[in-house]
Amino acid sequence: MIGTVCSTGSRKRPNRALVRVSNPHRQWRTRFRSGAGTDISVRGQARSRKSSVDNGRDNPPAAAPPSFFCNSAEIAQPTSPTKYRDGVSKVKRIPEPELMDEPDQARAYAEADFDQPNALFVETFTRCFPDFNRGRLLDVGCGPADIPIRFAGLFPEINVVAVDGAQSMISHADRAIERAGMAARIRTICWRVGREYGPAAIHGRVDGVISNSLLHHLDEPAALWRAISRYAKFQAPVLVMDLRRPRSHNAAEDIVAQYSGNEPEILKRDFYHSLLAAYREDEVREQLIAAGLPHFSVEQISDRHLVAYGRLSAG
């Protein structure tokens, strides 16, 4: 559930041969993907298929994987790639836990700097729905509540119902809301998307729905679209923003290094896993068609974000 600064500029990729020499982590990943003489055991240790001596020379041991890129379970069960129509390989989606309920995870996420992607979220909403400025707004997967606080500050006639499935995250949200002086206009609720009945506070239909960086946590994304259809009024504006799965493990590693290089290890690990758990535009469009929302638009808005937006039709 990690997203960071939007960047639309192009980047020149490093020379791959140089990376293999200077970065043993990348060398390990390359060997792992290509299968060049390497097997992976259940414990994630690399071993050569060949004998330990080849033509009289010892084979060098494989470099250890970077700690935040993968754990032993993922190493033991790598996912095979599929292909785009243009022939460029893409990685299959690797689900991750739905909740960030570990205290260390919640604290790292709450303390991270998401100013630019969160500003991008608010900017995108106001661009898509310039006439929305009052009523009840439901934020599904509110995290530490930075986005609800931004909406409440920007629109004085908006009240926000902010829900998240992790109590540890709600605790950080409550403290942030109190510091911002928004407790009278933002109500937090611990509720997990997918449960049959939501809390009474969000019954009665809301005037708009937003969600940021929740979709990739859901192995059953239909739960989010059902919740939106259940709790939003007719013609209510809806904006869902999330990470966009990169085309390769290399691309995911590069994104982590570029945008989270100085962040705590736990945040970099979660960011990498979230990138691999994210959906692509075509997958989100299929979700929307199945949910009875085929009129929603889906767009890529940064090198690692996509949005789905529209107004709720009668259902």
Image (tube, helix red, strand yellow):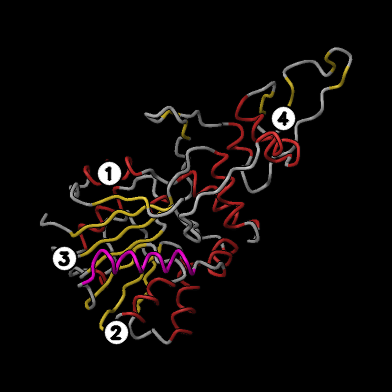
Question: What are the residue bounds of the magenta stretch?
Answer: 115-130
Q: CA distance from mark 4 to mark 1?
A: 39 Å
**Label 3, on which residue?**
233
**Label 1, on which residue?**
285
Q: Secondary structure at mark 1?
A: helix
Q: Residue shown at 54%/68% (left/top)?
A: 113
Mark closest to the chain's N terminus, 1 or 2: 2
Q: CA distance from mark 1 to mark 3?
A: 22 Å
Q: Secondary structure at mark 4?
A: strand
21 in relation to 188, above or below: above
Residue type at mark 1 is: Arg
Residue type at mark 4 is: Ala
Q: Position of residue 108 (x, y in %)?
A: 58, 65
Mark closest to the chain's N terminus, 4 or 2: 4
Q: Nearer the viewer, mark 4 or mark 2?
A: 2
Q: Nearer the viewer, mark 1 or mark 3?
A: 1
Q: In the picture, which quadrant includes the C terminus?
A: bottom left
Q: Position of residue 163 (x, y in %)?
A: 36, 67
Q: Single out the residue that lies furthest toward the right.
A: 56
**Label 4, on which residue?**
46
Left or right of residue 176: residue 85 = left
Q: Residues within 10 Å of mark 1 (few under 14, many from 20)?
A: some
Left or right of residue 40: residue 291 = left
